[in-house]
Image: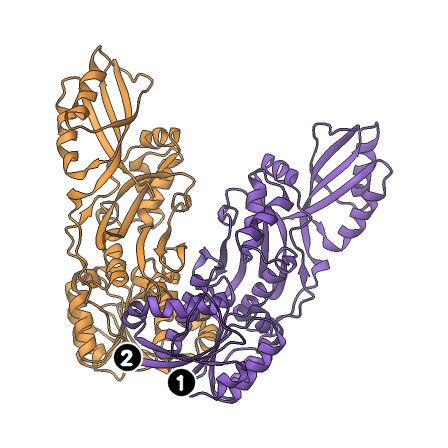
Chain colours: A purple, B orange
Amino acid sequence: MKKLRVGICGWGNVATGLFNTIENNNKFIKSNGNLEIEIVVIGARRDNPKCDPGKIKIERDIFDVIDHDIDVLVELIGGVEVARELILKAIKNKKHIITANKAVLFHHGDEIFKEARSNDIKVLFESSVCAGTPIIKLLTEELSANKVTKIAGMLNGTSNFILSNMEEGADFKPTLELAQKEGYAEPDPTFDIEGMDAAHKIGILSSLAYGTPLPPDDFYIEGISKVEKIDFKYAKDMGFTIKHLAVSKLNNENIELRAHPVLIKEDSYLANLKSVRNGIEIETDLLGTLHIAGSGAGQESTASGVISDLVHLANSNNNTKEINLSSKKKLIDFLSLSFQYYFYIEAEDIPGVMASITSMFAEKKIGIESIVQKEDLKDNMVPIVLITDLFLEKEHDDLLKNILNLDSVFKVRSIRIEID
Amino acid sequence: MKKLRVGICGWGNVATGLFNTIENNNKFIKSNGNLEIEIVVIGARRDNPKCDPGKIKIERDIFDVIDHDIDVLVELIGGVEVARELILKAIKNKKHIITANKAVLFHHGDEIFKEARSNDIKVLFESSVCAGTPIIKLLTEELSANKVTKIAGMLNGTSNFILSNMEEGADFKPTLELAQKEGYAEPDPTFDIEGMDAAHKIGILSSLAYGTPLPPDDFYIEGISKVEKIDFKYAKDMGFTIKHLAVSKLNNENIELRAHPVLIKEDSYLANLKSVRNGIEIETDLLGTLHIAGSGAGQESTASGVISDLVHLANSNNNTKEINLSSKKKLIDFLSLSFQYYFYIEAEDIPGVMASITSMFAEKKIGIESIVQKEDLKDNMVPIVLITDLFLEKEHDDLLKNILNLDSVFKVRSIRIEID
């Protein structure tokens, strides 16, 4: 049996979850993973009243963890810049790295992987995407022989929890508050509900799948905060539901990368992942469509992923796998993509309003697949719901503005439709 | 980059699919898998007119493949006894083994793994369950830290194809013929439609999940041949559909192992895997419920799994992982389990028939949750559909016989209901 000497940096919920799991599930790790894990040192600025590390050495300066006789440093401090510095210093000191930190990988992954290669060190990060649901190893190991052509999924538990509740009739604000109460959302939820968390994750998966450097964060990222409860009702009337989807797909051998709300067929696989579940659909040349889904957060799930990285480290040989960054694939300009759209428009119920709205689409030669005037709201207002044909993304913002500028229109919003 | 010298035994569809995939996807295998695969020799009793192996040496006696300078033997001959002999001989000659053959593993896996351990040889078999959908590595690698408590899934593509078509209104026999025409079912489909194929697969998964020897094949195995189209209609009226499910779950720390048709809630994950898709639901202590699904058959999918085994072999260290067989868990006697049941009964439409049927249940103190007399069939026959409360499996056969023995009853069949 292989033994690994481990230093953990960070001593919050995730770290103490890992500590407890290594203790509680020791039997499985030994028999299934062929591994004995010894936690040698913990870097913790302060004690955690919920967890007693026993006789394990505590370093108040997390950088001192690197000086101990450890094989691997498990980075669980979160954040970006300090984490980067810690990881790079540990690599230079020939410590393997396991991290659950998607943000540091997204922003500094290329630098970190390069440093790791030149030091013959491994960086493993299963828990950085969907916690312990083994998506990273699936992509990097099990699908080795495959040409991946698409990855699409719900990668943010908070967003999926909120949208799933709104689908059942809840409003956005109280659902967000419920998510915060249940621990599914941070006190400042911006990062989750504005789509950045999902964007970081799809960025990492995209880079792994296509062998490209990590993307800059200026690809198209939109969160769920503009979706309203009534949109679910109208979507459902047409056989759709609304999800926050992160997509990376090959499009003429270049990469379409985006994270935003979509109308998606309600009988599709991804539409049926509810609440805090995370899941992805991967399309490849050999396997066709593969689905994997699980809990995307939680300290035990994260611990499972970190331990699977430790097991992998213990049972793999010493060759650091070349990460292929030779791909010539480029990110496609989002404005050059085409989507079908759902539009919700609130207008005054007066003669000619339909004509003036539809003429905005006609001016841009955008076809309308269906248009329905719904039951009146109060104050002589009427909601109009329409579905467009495919049109170029670069026409969208203008179109939205033109409609809103109509005298009779009070409100307009739009959601892309995900066709396949 | 690591290089592996490979001998392939068998030269049918799967082997030629592997050969072509190694050639076509060489770029991905090298860059993602860090591996150069050299096919040194092929054991083929006869040429395959669909595939020219070029300059690769062909051995007409597959056992001669072992004498070549190869690192790994890929066994794709199928069948049981010759495959066992070939694998054992190759292991003794220090060749690693990759096999897609679930039957040889199910019947002789314990002997094969023991021989492999004593020779310090690896036996990998990703494609033996659900082809390239990476279920084996998920269980044996990625979930190392987890206590698995349940595995349930649709593991046979043929059965799922037939049932999915019947759900849409087709009859059994023409659907089976369609499956044969489409290549989803063998000319002799017995092994698939009578549940043996799914049983072998769940047997292998169960042994891996709980660290037990492979089970004998006398656990409860029932195929789909008795399910009728009308059962889907009545199931649907109650919110169910019908699937062939293979289950291995912990039940008071012993193992409940079975493969048979079930009524399952139509909005559940497994109910929504249609056609030839395979998929499983795994419950663990750390990850909660995990889903994975993909194509469960096909030469390209199988090739993907075999290549993932080659990549794994190339990138793992030389320690043969101890397979833990120390578990004291026993198979639970099927007759001691309890199920709720769906009963379909065709009876003469005469006074007192309901009373005589329901008294059969009352005699055995089996509660009836719901009972509906449906619209009349021809000849004064009436279908009665009922759902029972939970009752012990050992009461079932008697009950079925007692009902059929009633003068007014012409037909009766039953399907278990899968509750969770």
Q: CA distance from mark 1 to mark 2?
A: 16 Å
| Residue hosting label 1 | A318
Choose the circle earlier in sequence order: 1 or 2: 2
Relative to the observer, which residue lies in front, B81 or A294? Answer: A294
Please indicate, yes or no, whether residue B61 appears anywhere in the rendered image.
no
| Residue hosting label 2 | A1
Q: Nearer the viewer, mark 1 or mark 2?
A: 2
Is A401 positioned to the left or the right of B27 in the image? Answer: right
Under mark 2, the amino acid is Met
Q: Position of residue A330 (x, y in %)?
A: 64, 70
Under mark 1, the amino acid is Asn
**Total marks placed:** 2
Is B395 positioned to the left or the right of B308 in the image? Answer: left
The residue that appears at 38% across and 79% down in the rendered structure is A55
Query: What SS does tag 2 mark?
Result: loop
Q: Hey, which quadrant is residue B194 in on the image? A: top left
The residue that appears at 53% across and 77% down in the rendered structure is A324
Give the quarter of the figure containing the C terminus of chain B: top left
The residue that appears at 25% across and 58% down in the rendered structure is B206
